[in-house]
Amino acid sequence: MADANTPLVVGIPRETFSGESRVAAVPKTIGQLTKAGCRVLIEKQAGLAAGFTDDEFVDKNAELVDSHEAIYSQADIVLQVRAGGANPSDGQADLELCREGQILIAMCDPLSEPQAIEQLAGRGVSAFAMELLPRITRAQSMDVLSSMATIAGYKAVLLAANTLPKMFPMLMTAAGTVSAAKVFIVGAGVAGLQAIATAKRLGAIVRAYDVRSAVKEQVESLGGKFVEFDLQSAEGQGGYAKAMDEEFYRKQREMMLKVVAENDVVITTAAVPGKKAPTLITIEMVHAMAPGSVIVDVAAERGGNCELTQPGETIVENGVQVLGPLNLPSQIPQHASEMYAKNLATFLVHLKKTVLDDGELSPNVDDEIIRETLITHGGQVTNDRVRELLNPTPST
């Protein structure tokens, strides 16, 4: 680690996760990092898949390096899109390059892949998982989940519109009137709200449902109609939906059958952090939809909200196409990278001001942002939630 008189070296490697097109820094954020007193290294062509050339980074005073190994050997802090549990297979090679005391800031999927976090601890890495950022006002500018969910919700609607054998808007033509498509959004979190807004802009009739009744006003503000079921609210900590028991989901599915059958497009976005996505769309519901209808399951990476979802594939059941797209933000890599990189740069500046004392990491447990995101330090897994997953308390 750098001393007080030496700039911290921040390294941005090329992503190794299959199909990942994003990059953890963009030319716009290099200035933010250098202004904070950092020297920035970036692997050659790290941003090319997202539309950023090496020359653009050099123009902003980033230094190009030839290899992955050079980034890890020189950087005090490594910024990545996917690391640890978010890149469990290809990330093993990166793990071997990590040095004791090195700081890693990335999406790490710690609640789904805690063993990968234990491996990071074993390398002596101080890792920060951006998924665990608390949902508080001063952390909004660092919120990678919201940034990426915004893009996923937008892209999901475009996929649906491209697949549906109808147009979304109502049109009055010399050949007759074309009726508007009916779109049902399940889950009105950030991805769902962006899906509502996008479908509405394309001219669809939009309805939405969420287990958190408090989001009704947000749905209606975007021009959607909120569908209400006679069920208890399932709002959990930090504004996320919480996992409910099977009886809740059974009643929910019964009430949802009629609504799903009435729509041309269903977009599902319901997810619970660290849990398998709840099954909300059953085979029975799919069979009740008209042939040609489309389901886009944004939660496919978490097992899917539709009973028929196959992650990464499109299947056809009774004439209904069920799409299970993976890594939707990576399909719009330029804007996804810009948003993600801004989140990371803002977090790093906060980290530097808060807990980097003379270049050494001194975790500040009084700062909620640092406390919640730090998952490994000093050879140990430091996050309570991850530790509990690794060593569950026996039930009595």
Image (cartoon, rainbow, N blue to C red):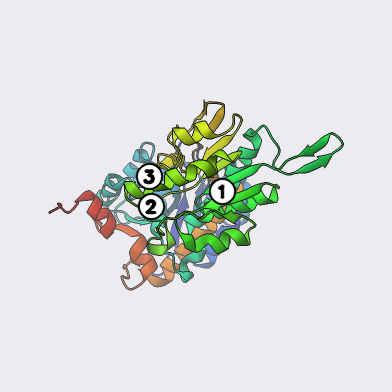
Residue named by callout 2: 273
- Dot 1: element: helix
Location of residue 103 by image quarter: bottom left
Marks 2 and 1 sit apart, C-alpha to C-alpha, by 17 Å
- Dot 3: element: helix
Q: Residue furthest bottom?
A: 366
Total tally of numbered discs in the picture:
3
Residue 107 % position (x, y): 42, 51
Compared with 41, 304 (above or below) is above
Q: Residue furthest right?
A: 174
| Neighbourhood count class around disc 1 (C-alpha, 10 Å): few under 14, some 14–19, many 20 upward | many
- Quick one: quadrant of the N terminus? bottom left
| Front position among marks 1 and 3 | 3
Residue named by callout 1: 153
Residue named by callout 3: 250
Residue 133 seen: yes
- Quick one: quadrant of the C terminus? bottom left
Marks 3 and 2 sit apart, C-alpha to C-alpha, by 21 Å
Mark 2 or 1 closer to N-term?
1
Compared with 197, 217 (above or below) is below
Mark 1 or 3 closer to N-term?
1
Query: Which residue is depicted at the point 69% across and 35% down?
Result: 166
Is 89 positioned to the left or the right of 181 in the image? left
- Nearest the viewer among 189 and 367 is 189
Residue 116 % position (x, y): 30, 45
Mark 3 or 2 closer to N-term?
3
Query: Which residue is depicted at the point 61% across and 44% down?
Result: 183
